[in-house]
Structure formats: C-alpha cells, structure tokens
Amino acid sequence: MKIRTTILAALLCMTGYTAAQSLSREEYRLRVAEYSQVLKQAQQRTLAGQASLSLAKKGFLPRLDLNAQGTINLNQWGDWTGAGPGMINVGHSGITDLSYFPGTYRCYTYQGMLTAAQPIYAGGGLSAQKKMAEADHQLNLLTEELTMDQISYQADAIYWNASSAWALMKVMTQYRAIVEKQCNVIVDRFNEGAISRTDLLMMQTRRKEAELQYINSRKNYAIAMHNLHSLMGVDPEAPAETLSDIDAGCEAIEEIAFDEVLTRRADYQSAQVYIEKMRYARKSALSQFMPQLNGFITGGWSTNTPNMSTPVKFNLVTGINLSAPLFQWNKRGQTNRQQKASIAIQELQRSYQADAILKELSNALTSVNESMKQVSTAKENMEVAQQSLDLNAFRYNEGRSSIVEVLSAQLSWIQAQTNLISAYMTHKMAIAEYRRVISE
C-alpha cells in the first residue's frame, strides 16, 4: 500500500495534476446540460412552439382592420378647379327637391373604412389548426427531453473515458516503476558478473517499451480531459478535476418493464403525438371543402362622387358572408385518402419504433449482465497475474528462473491490468446505455 501511494504521488508531480476539486458523474451531467448549445436550441424551439400555439388560438377571436385609400389625378391637375353642378338633394318623401348642394371639381378622392370580422363556422379548420399547434408544442417538449437524454449519455461516455484514461495512466506508471526496479536489479547483477549481457539487453528493451506505453497513456489522458472540459464549456487546458474511479464498483440497476419504458421514451411518445397531429391535419385539409360562415361590421367615410366635393357622411354596414363549395371533381375524396395514407404510414413507423426500443432494451440488459461477469473474471485474472509477477521476480532474483519468465510475467500483468480497466469501462458504458434506453 505504501509503495502504491508513493507511485501515485510521483505521478501527480510528473503530470502537474492538481486535485483542486472533485467532479462526480451527476454533477458533470448537469454542467454539460447547462452549457450545451444543442439543448439551448431545443429550448428555443419549444419557446417558438408556445408562440405558434398562442397564434393559433387567436384565430377564434374577432378581427379589426382599417382600410384607407386616397387618389390624385396627376395628368389633369389644373382642370379640376372651378364650380360644378353640385349634388341634387332628394327629400324624405321621395319627391325630388330642386335645391342642391353646390359642389366643386377637384383632382383627388379618398375613403377610410374600419371593418370588424368574426369567424362563425370554418368547417372545423380553426379547431384543427389549434390542435395541430398543441401537438407541435408537445413535440418540441419531447424533442427537448430526447436531446437531454442524448446529452446525458454523451456526458457519461466522455466522463468514464476520462476516468479510464486516468486509471490506465496510473497503471502504466506503476508498470514502469516495476520494470525500472527489476532493471536496476539486473544492472547490479550484470556489474557483478552474475548474469549475461543478454538478460540486461532484454530488460532494457522492456524498460523502453514501458516508457513508450506510459507516454501514450499520458497523451490519451490529456486528450480525454480536453474532451471532458470542452463538453461543459471549460478551457481544455484547465486544471484536471478528481473524477470517480473507474473501478468504483459495479452499479446495481433496476429492471423496468417494456411497457413502462415506452411511456418514458421521448421518441416513442413523439411518434404517438405525431399521429394525433396528422389526424388533425386531415381535419384541417378537409375543412376547405366545408361551408365557411363569417360575420362582419364595417363603417367609414368616403366621397360619394369621384372628383366632386360633396358632403361626406359616415356609413355603417353589417352582414354575413357564406361560402359553400359545391363541385370540385372529387378533390375532397382524394384529399381524404391522401391524409389517411399518411396517418397509416406514421402508425407503422410507431410500431417499428416500438420494436427498435424492445431490441435496445434487451441488448442493454444483456450488456450490463455480461459486463459484470467480465469484471469478475478480469479481477480473478488480475490476482493470478500479480501472484505470477511476484513469484517470478523473486525466483529470478534468487537465480532459480530465467529472464524470459520474468518478462512474460510482466507482460501478463500489464495485460491483466489493461483488461480489468477495459472491463470496468465496458460495464460503465453498458449502464450508461441502459439509462439512455430507459430515459433515466
């Protein structure tokens, strides 16, 4: 234990590593989600969906429009002057009155009208558009949830990759120290004339190999930390945090029934919502073939006679506008068949999505269970390799075995260590995949 602590301290000094703060997987997930530009885009799309839903609701409300127009005759600007015949005054009894309002010719006319309109019946189109906007908003929320699941899985993958890179660099440091220690023993024995130069050359070759492996592991760890920092928006060269150990233990998972998984999965729920949207889209498409009824009130001022100056009065008009399509060469039937086919396609897509989720769930559970067995086997193999290394090093130092046996034991040891870290990494990623499948 003391030797391992010394090796770790030396490693921290050589790499310039400062354990200023720790970073758990859960905290890293939160920091990645907080920084993620992809998630922020999904959130903005959700806000846009809310605005679209609000706009769709406005279609049921009255509408007020102002229409104003003025014209000037530029070709006969100077002709529109002087007195004119005026306007004949008609009495209330219907008898023509010889009196009239004097008028004056002019080169301009104008009008201003204010209209209030209220849709009364639109063939179900307005209601269908509102339901489609609600479905779009729900789809945006589900897309945001799905994006969050993907970001969480990516964060787990980057986190455990960095943790395994750190563990591998520690192993390579320990391996380099073991080889260096054995090499020093062989150098002393060679200087004493107890062994041949062949043993010395073989051990020196192994020492250089260990050095190369350590350098490569140090590079991989630095890159892994760069990736970890970049994903949460931190300077890649920032001091490294203390991560959870890759060999912190096998996490227990809670198996969830397939039907419950379907209720959790945002992509499957999106498929269901999209089918509902397509059904409302069908109603909206068919509404154009239904009667349309609108009421309106309009009022304003306008010149009664073009280019004639006469008294201008306020006019108020109210009415109802009815539009009913009668014959359009069976366009309604073709539109209905087209929309039904689109709905059937989406229902088949939902069924395909359910099959894919079932396969993902089965594969994820199998990966978790088998990776646990790999970890157990790798641990046992590591114990055997450690005993073999200790025994062969002792036997060689006592002159009872060859250098080949020592080198073979060293190779088996580093391979066992690498396999153990790989098994832990596989198990962590299997759990991360299972969490992604169940949308946890």
Image (tube, rainbow, N blue to C red):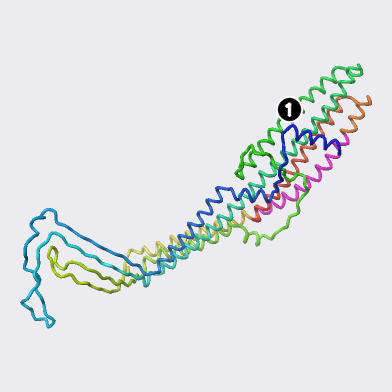
For residue 208, above or below residue 31: above
For residue 10, above or below residue 145: above
For residue 377, above or below residue 258: above
Is 254 left, or right, of 276 in this rendering? right
The location of residue 360, given as percent across then percent down, is 65, 52
The count of marks equals: 1
Residue shown at 18% from the left, 70% from the top: 312
Q: Secondary structure beneath disc 1?
A: helix
Is 26 left, or right, of 98 in this rendering? right
| Magenta region, main secondary structure | helix
> Where does the N terminus fall, quadrant-wise?
top right
Q: Is residue 90 magenta?
A: no
The location of residue 189, given as percent across then percent down, is 90, 20
The quadrant in which residue 403 appears is: top right
The quadrant in which residue 80 appears is: bottom left
> Where does the C terminus fall, quadrant-wise?
bottom right
Is 190 left, or right, of 173 in this rendering? right
Q: Nearer the viewer, residue 347 or 163?
A: 163
Q: Nearer the viewer, residue 328 or 69?
A: 69
Q: Residue furthest bottom?
A: 93
The location of residue 51, given as percent across then percent down, is 46, 60
- The residue that disc 1 covers is 212
Q: Nearer the viewer, residue 343 or 85?
A: 85
Mark 1, other Cα within 10 Å: few <14 / some 14–19 / many ≥20: some
Is 224 left, or right, of 201 in this rendering? left
The location of residue 101, given as percent across then percent down, is 9, 72
Mark 1 belongs to which amino acid?
Leu
Residue shown at 71% from the left, 53% from the top: 365
Q: Which residues are magenta?
A: 359-388
Q: Nearer the viewer, residue 146 or 90?
A: 90
